[in-house]
Image (cartoon, rainbow, N blue to C red):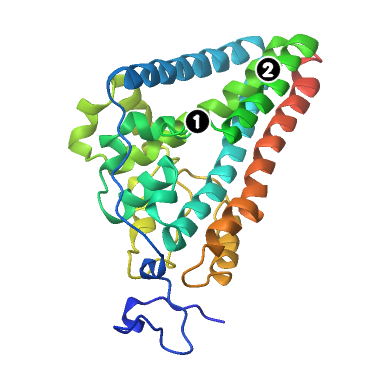
Amino acid sequence: MILESSLSSVGEAGFAIPGTRTYSRAFIPGDQEVAPCELTGTRRKVFLAFYGAIVVSAITGLAYTFYFNPLFGLTALVVGYCFDNLAFTCGHVGFHAEFIDSSEGKMKTLSHHAFIHHYRNIRVFHETWLETRMSYFVDPRTVVTAKSCVKFLAIALVFFPVIYFVHPVLGIAIYSAQAVPLLLQSTVHEWYHNPPNNRASFYSPPVYWFFTLLEKLSIASTRDHMVHHRHGLNDLDHVHKWLDLRLPFGELMPSLLWRKALSVYEPGESRMTEFARRGAPFKLFVGSRVLATVTIAAAYYWIARSH
């Protein structure tokens, strides 16, 4: 069945033409425009310090892993990069599901900023760079929630026993090899939509030249990313190019997930969002993180421990 999306198929009374499926935010009850998250005062200083700690710990941790065993460090980084991209595409599908059937007030900071970025202000990522980057790790609007507490507890239950009972480098590798790609993801989309003539002054020289190198190596591509923005509010289902960074065959899984998400849509309900939060996208997101951790641990035993 071919799914068609067009606001023109919605009449003044809000009814769709028979035989078509209309993906429109007009059906969302109580949807109102919400301003992007902005940190100010002490909260901004705290989050800035938190972000700095993540950057420093991730980079120094990865450097130590390479120092401990270069082959293990490289393996861990490649594994972290691949699985992070898979997890990213699952979350990305979830965002676009929310864009179709979830009100702005129910969106978390990252998905809400992504919504604003797509359909209202494409510059919002670099205009609220701290809030957006931090939302990849913890939601600045609601830092302490039951879900976030469970998340950090799960990380602690894996990280600290590994350091104590196995070897500190394994725990450091598991953290840094996944945190570094996540930092990369949180910045590259911002980079794509930051005007080229503004990048050199906006980013520090090491960051600017690093992302310039990624573009030269075709790991990142501003031009290719623009394909993802060829849709709008009139054709919310016509989404392509799910990856922000290059990963061979990485577009296959999110494309299949997106087709499934579209198939559960019902006007006025949040079935796509529920599918993304509880169905295959969420399960594959968690699975990607777990498999990355297990694979890095296996690499430690096969490579680092044997030397």
Quadrant (top left/top right/bottom left/bottom right) for the N terminus: bottom right
The residue labelled by disc 1 is 137
Q: 29 or 219: nearer the eye?
A: 29
Which mark is in front, 1 or 2? 1
Residue 171 is marked as 2
Quadrant (top left/top right/bottom left/bottom right) for the C terminus: top right
Is residue 71 rendered to the left or right of residue 229?
A: right
**In this picture, is 120 found above or below 165?**
below
In the image, farthest residue toward the front: 30
Q: 116 or 184: nearer the eye?
A: 116
Residues at discs 1 and 2 in contact (Cβ within 8 Å)? no
**In this picture, is 296 found above or below 1?**
above
Q: The disc labelled 2 sits on which kind of residue?
A: Gly
In the image, farthest residue toward the left: 197
- Count residues near mark 1 (Cα–Cα under 10 Å), then give few for <14, some for 14-19, many for 20+: some
- Count residues near mark 2 (Cα–Cα under 10 Å), then give few for <14, some for 14-19, many for 20+: many
The percent coordinates of residue 147 (x first, y second) are 60, 35
Q: The disc labelled 1 sits on which kind of residue?
A: Phe
The percent coordinates of residue 155 (x first, y second) are 66, 25
Is residue 68 rendered to the left or right of residue 62?
A: right
Q: Secondary structure at mark 2?
A: helix
Q: In the picture, residue 251 is in which quadrant?
A: bottom right
Instruction: Identify which residue is drawn at 75% across, 21% down.
Output: 300
Between the residue at mark 1 and the residue at mark 2, the CA separation in whole angstroms equals 18 Å
Residue 109 is marked as none
Instruction: Identify which residue is drawn at 43% across, 71% down.
Output: 23
Instruction: Identify which residue is drawn at 58% across, 43% down.
Output: 87
